[in-house]
Image (cartoon, grey):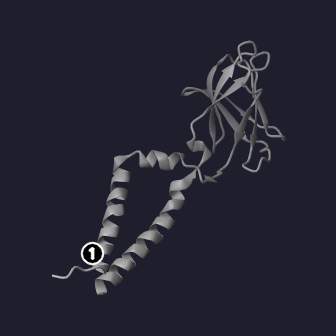
Amino acid sequence: MKRAGIVKGFVAWLAAAGILAAQPLWAVGPSDASSVSDIALREGGVLVGQVVDPQGIPKANLPVTLLAGQQELGVGRTDASGYFAFSGLQGGVYQVGTSQRQETLRVWTPSAAPPAAQPGALIVDGTELARGQFGYARFCLSDPWVYGPLIATAVAVPTAFLICCHPHSP
């Protein structure tokens, strides 16, 4: 009988640990999603964008850096409405960022831009967190070092419960 109490306590502890550990597994920040935005330059090779916080409020007087690969092409500042601009650019891939967020942009000349290209970049500066997305969990569960112990636990716990709670007579 004492073994049954130990197993029940272990199962309860395992369930509580699973509930507590699930929170970090399901939390995915937007910076974790690797995406490239298509942006159409304005005449004269002008790239326009806006920096806002996670609530959508424009961030004024914030430094914005423009990179091409590892080379810094310029540093600008947002105006009172959170807008910034860089001029003299050609089509290509650039990184535009603040101290907290960096976006990769595929920039197109006005004549070559695809119909889905946006007229400007939007950078959400800050730490936002989206819960309930399964991307990270799918990544983790594709690793045998993660799902192997999960399967072993799924087999061992019921087996231990059956052995302790339903003893065989000799």
Q: Nearer the viewer, residue 157 or 34?
A: 157
In x, y percent, where is residue 47?
74, 25
In x, y percent, where is residue 94?
62, 26
Q: Determine the residue positioned at 77% across, 42% down.
A: 61
Q: Quadrant of residue 43?
A: top right
Question: Which residue is disc 1 drawn over?
Answer: 163
Q: Residue furthest right?
A: 80
What is the three-letter code of the residue carrying label 1?
Ile
Q: Quadrant of residue 65?
A: top right
Q: Determine the residue positioned at 63% across, 42% down.
A: 101
Q: Nearer the viewer, residue 43 or 153?
A: 153
Q: Nearer the viewer, residue 89 or 27?
A: 27
- In this rendering, the answer to whether 57 lies above or below 71 is below
Q: Quadrant of the N terminus?
A: bottom left
Q: Determine the residue positioned at 47% across, 71% down.
A: 16
In x, y percent, where is residue 145?
34, 50
